[in-house]
Image (tube, coloured by chain):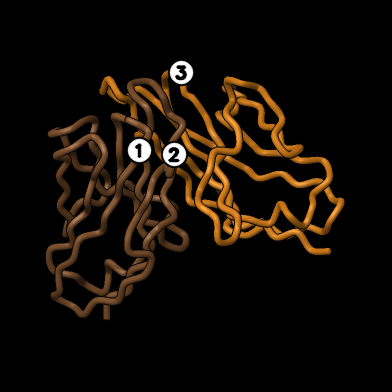
Amino acid sequence: NAGVTQTPKFQVLKTGQSMTLQCAQDMNHEYMSWYRQDPGMGLRLIHYSVGAGITDQGEVPNGYNVSRSTTEDFPLRLLSAAPSQTSVYFCASRLRQGHYEQYFGPGTRLTVT
Amino acid sequence: AQRVTQPEKLLSVFKGAPVELKCNYSYSGSPELFWYVQYSRQRLQLLLRHISRESIKGFTADLNKGETSFHLKKPFAQEEDSAMYYCALGYAGGTSYGKLTFGQGTILTVHP
């Protein structure tokens, strides 16, 4: 099993550009989520999904969109990048209801200039 | 509101010294508490959970419901323990899947 994979590892964007961060898992996990990691702020939940076709907002959803068309994939879209979105982004998955152990991807370091 | 607080952003100790990473939470129900660790150039991974009451890599953590704390302890720190540590709270939160909230993280540095 590859676990949770993310692409790209690094990305530099100009303000106003859009892009999609990819996330996939091969563990047949129902629950997937996106976090951003900022110094002193810890991990903050952006969006999450409890299954294909079901998504919901987390703590800091503004400026981001998600979709979950398959169990395996959970892409994160930045609609119009802003410098405040410079961060490290982590995708994570967990098995199902009541399971709190999360498996994390390696992260994507995004810089918006 | 549910919250996890890690009061120390940075913690430095010398090799062989005891180390304690503090974690306090606020939740009125029955929480599940976890410690996650991120070593340099590695992905975030689960270190231990309170329900299993286990010791991993010499670390232990006891849930103290009276003090709403879940501090991570190790009697003799090693250089390879240097990492970012996150405390996390799992709770039902009105949803069937439950929510997981992370603290701000503590960077532990163990000096030789």
- Kindly identify the amino acid type of the residue bearing the numbered disc 3: Ser
Q: Are the two marked residues, 2 and 1, in contact with CB atoms closer than 8 angstroms?
A: yes
Q: For the residue carrying disc 2, how many other residues have a C-alpha within 10 Å: few (<14), some (14-19), or many (20+)?
A: few
Which chain comes out orange in the rendered image?
A: B
Foreground residue among A86 and B2: A86
The residue singled out by tag 1 in the image is: A26
Name the secondary structure under disc 3. loop
From the top left corner, tell me how far across and down residue B92 is, in percent.
Answer: 34, 22
Say if B14 sits above or below B47 in the image: below
- Kindly identify the amino acid type of the residue bearing the numbered disc 2: Asn
Residue in the image at 84% along x and 50% along y: B17
The residue singled out by tag 3 in the image is: B30
Q: Quadrant of the N terminus of chain B?
A: top left
From the top left corner, tell me how far across and down residue B65 is, in percent.
Answer: 57, 22
Q: Quadrant of residue B97?
A: top left
The residue singled out by tag 2 in the image is: A1
Q: For the residue carrying disc 1, how many other residues have a C-alpha within 10 Å: few (<14), some (14-19), or many (20+)?
A: some
